[in-house]
Amino acid sequence: MINVSYSQLHCDTVELILEEQGSNVFTFNDFSSYEGGIARTTVARLKVRVIDKAVSDGLCSWSLFMSLDNNGSPIDEWEELTLYSNGLASNPLTSLLEIRITNDCATSNLDGVFTSFTDVSAINIKEIIEPIILDALNINHPGACGTKNVNGPGDYINNYTEFTFKIEVRIKPGMAYNPGRFGLTLNFRLEENI
Amino acid sequence: MRKNKLKVFIAAAALIATTANAQLIDEKDVSITLDLQPVLQLEMTTPDQIEFVFDEINEYQAGITKYAATILKVSSTVSWDLYAVGRSQGNNGANFWDQQIDYGNDNLNAIPNLPLSLLELKQSHANTGDGAALPSNQSDYSTVFSNAKSPSGNNSIYVNGGTSTPPGNTDKYIAGHSGTTGVTGDDYMVGGSYLTQTGRSSDYYYAIDYRILPGLPAIFPMAFDKDNVAEDLVSANTAASYAEPGVYTMYVQYILLEDQ
């Protein structure tokens, strides 16, 4: 019998809480919506909670990533759930989905900018809060609203404006794609920096 | 033997004492669903009824033309085709105008069966999606109306005997054509709308002229079927045939459909 025990590296807890806001179904059924697109100012809120160890080594920090999953479909296309037509055109591309991540203190380098994925490959993973070369000097502690890449321990209760991220989505399909129902999954990953 | 036991014990103790540091990670997902519902919109501006009243000799000889009597405007989110088909209620047969009332004395040579194909259409600009068509005459209705002395089926409306069969690759479409090659310009029009694709020659906007030319005698020399076979009353009946005077009606159906 072999028992291996795990212990934390630098942090005691990292927790990501997702609160979805309303429907994530984008329905395009008239010319205006096809041409003008549909924007949802908030589809979800991400709340971050990172707790330092009781005996801190001063290196507890975190990073937050965003990636896209299409369930094994061609890497630059949405997953086809059903087609409404003869399917002679192409399925919508992942780049149609534009995502904007913001928080009140604009801590992300992506803050306020609509970003999209040309495909779902790992190379396109977006860094909302960038990973760092672990050094106490590279850790940005919360509290001074306006600092970029805040990645020190803290939580959305005490530092709401730096640890809560709003996810906005915009889709403007145009008229070049197959009608049908398609799906994509946004994946958010909170990691302790090591 | 004791040495071996000792080695095993030390190795096991070393394993039990091993601890691994784990990176803390948490993940969450948001699923987005995209529901692209197909939209095919054909807007038509036209009088409820377009009347052609022939009561002058020169109208019989030169015909009557109604310019831009119908305006067609297309919005589509899918590749599309647009065609016109001549229809009637079938009182005189599926390929003929409905005779509502007849004038005159029912002479045996007075023919009440006027072919639907006698109606000529002219679209304001050429079809840009008919590259792969193999027309028996024309692949669209963009040719100018023929001189009264030169009968042709260039502009005769497509008729399908009251069925739902769309025109084939030898027939006329207003936009797009039969086939699904997917080759741009060959047999379909790209999704779009007249709202954004503006201009006189927009592929999403057509003005349709109508002409009826009875001729003298009234045999309708411009009537040709979809295979470009003459359907004038003499060709279809006897040399002495002419149109029975009366009131006739038919209708034109404009069909916008996904590329097929």
Image (tube, rainbow, N blue to C red):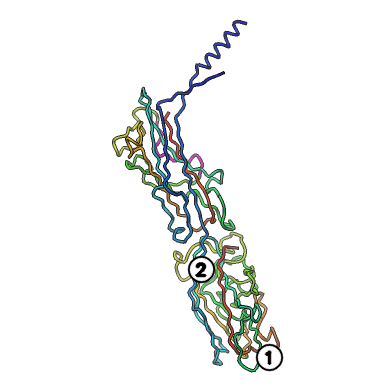
Residue A134: percent from left, percent from top: 39, 28
Using the image, name the chain to which the residue with label 2 belongs: B
User: Toward which corner of the image does residue A60 lie, by quadrant?
Assistant: top left
What's the residue at 50%, 16% (across, down)? B17
Q: Farthest residue in the bottom direction?
A: B105
Amino acid at the residue labelled 1:
Asn
What's the residue at 68%, 90% (across, down)? B109
Amino acid at the residue labelled 2:
Leu
Task: Please tell me whether mark 1 sits on a helix, a strand or a loop.
Answer: loop
Q: Establish if A109 lies above or below A38.
A: above
User: Toward which corner of the image does residue A14 lie, by quadrant?
Assistant: top left
| Measured Cα–Cα span from mark 2 to mark 1 | 42 Å
**Marker disc for residue B109:** 1
Residue B91: percent from left, percent from top: 64, 81
Residue A65: percent from left, percent from top: 44, 38
Q: Which residues are magenta?
A: A120-132
Using the image, name the chain to which the residue with label 1 belongs: B
The residue carrying pointer 2 sits among few (fewer than 14), some (14 to 19) or many (20 or more) residues within 10 Å by Cα, namely some
The residue carrying pointer 1 sits among few (fewer than 14), some (14 to 19) or many (20 or more) residues within 10 Å by Cα, namely some
Q: Farthest residue in the right direction?
A: B238
**Marker disc for residue B42:** 2
